[in-house]
Image (spheres, rainbow, N blue to C red):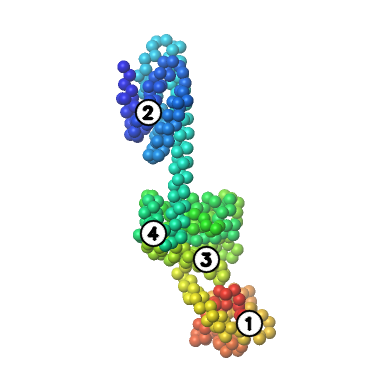
Amino acid sequence: MLRLDEVAAAAAGDAGGIDPGLLGDFLPIVVEAAASGRRLRRTELRACGEHGAAAALVGVPLRALVDLYLSACWRLWEELDTGPDAVRVRAAGLAVLRAADDAVAALAEGFQLARNDLSRQQESTRRDVFDLLLAGGPAAVEATGRAADLGLDLTSPHAVLVARHDLTFDHPSLTSVPRRLEGAVSGRHGDTSPLVATRNGLLVCIFAAPDRASVTLVGERLATVVAEATSAGGASDPGAGPGRAWQAAIGRTRPGAGAVRVSYEQAGSALDLAERLGLEDAVIDSGSLVVYEVLLRDRAAIDELITAVLGPLHDVPGSAAAMVETLEAYFACGGVATATATRLHLSVRAVTYRLQRIGDVLGLDPTDPAHRFTLHAAVLGARLLGTFAPR
């Protein structure tokens, strides 16, 4: 008498100890096929597909599932009594091999279809949580548990990165960046998982930020995955510096579901400020731009400051914008005339002449520490508002 239960148990052991119940009625069907020479029927193949789907839903690897069925077949062959007739043995062997072949094909199809459905469901869930967190308010709080299920603990510190690319992150050559970044930032043991998606052409990443190193890591990994994606897609990726193709900003780190939207808005504002200021860093820390945000909080006051401090430059023959550009470069170079000359591609003599002329006209000496703060604040304000010196 055939010991099908023992065959199934041994095959399950070969496959790493998975549930032998995933075989269903496969073994009795193979016994019948070996005796009659028939192939598996449509209903039997459908059942194999259902077992494949069931395995996918409980997390059984496809390799282990295939191993279960193939091991069951060769172990069953040892138990079959095919008699001494070589023709009969050959026919039975072919029937078993065809049954294994057809069953594994049906298994793999059912498994893959179920995995695809599961992946779509998970992606939909991730997107829903992502959108709720960025929306903020009660909806974000309600999404805390779902975010934790996805590997993002919002009770711990976290931050948001926002990046823009000249091509936008919806460009075909960059569509792999969210997935790559998600994989690159996920915890080594799968214990943390960011939420990464595109929004209006921007890349947005919500990630755990327990310390400064984790924030720095996200920026570094973004640079790597963008470079890989653009290289594979043939797009330009100059990186940081003049003519760069992309730039990112990271909002400040805080715990709590409501902090996601705050960090998101900070990152977006920092990205806009960086563009207006012409900052060349690839990844901007929003905390480093607080002083610029302070300047913009009182538009009337900053307009008045720009007009009062820089307005007289309009009366200077030549370009007022060139004078303000000289001040901006001078402050950016730490008040070193030689470095300013190099930055502006001018002679040191030309720079010192301009600085002296600016001091004469404005009554504020750029080289005097007592005057430098007022001048620097006015120059920064003019840059932020997109004009050097309004009339």
Say which label, 2 or 3, has the lower sequence index. Answer: 2
Picture residue at 37% right of the left edge, 63% below the top: 255
Query: How many neighbours does mark 1 have within 10 angstroms: few (below 14), some (14-19), or many (20 or more)?
Result: few
Q: Please identify the residue farthest to the top as the structure is shown.
A: 85
Picture residue at 35% right of the left edge, 59% below the top: 155
Which is in the foreground here, disc 4 or disc 2? 4
Query: Looking at numbered disc 4 in the image, what kind of residue is underneath it?
Result: Val
| Residue topped by disc 1 | 391
Say which label, 1 or 2, has the lower sequence index. Answer: 2
Q: Can you tell which quarter of the image residue 54 is in?
A: top left
| Residue topped by disc 4 | 141
Say which label, 1 or 4, has the lower sequence index. Answer: 4
Say which label, 4 or 2, has the lower sequence index. Answer: 2
Tell me: 388 left or right of 70: right
Query: How many neighbours does mark 4 have within 10 angstroms: few (below 14), some (14-19), or many (20 or more)?
Result: some
Assign a secondary structure to mark 2: loop
Q: Are marks 3 and 4 in contact (CB under 8 Å)?
A: no
Q: Can you tell which quarter of the image residue 251 is in?
A: bottom left
The answer to whether 97 is drawn above or below residue 143 in the figure is: above
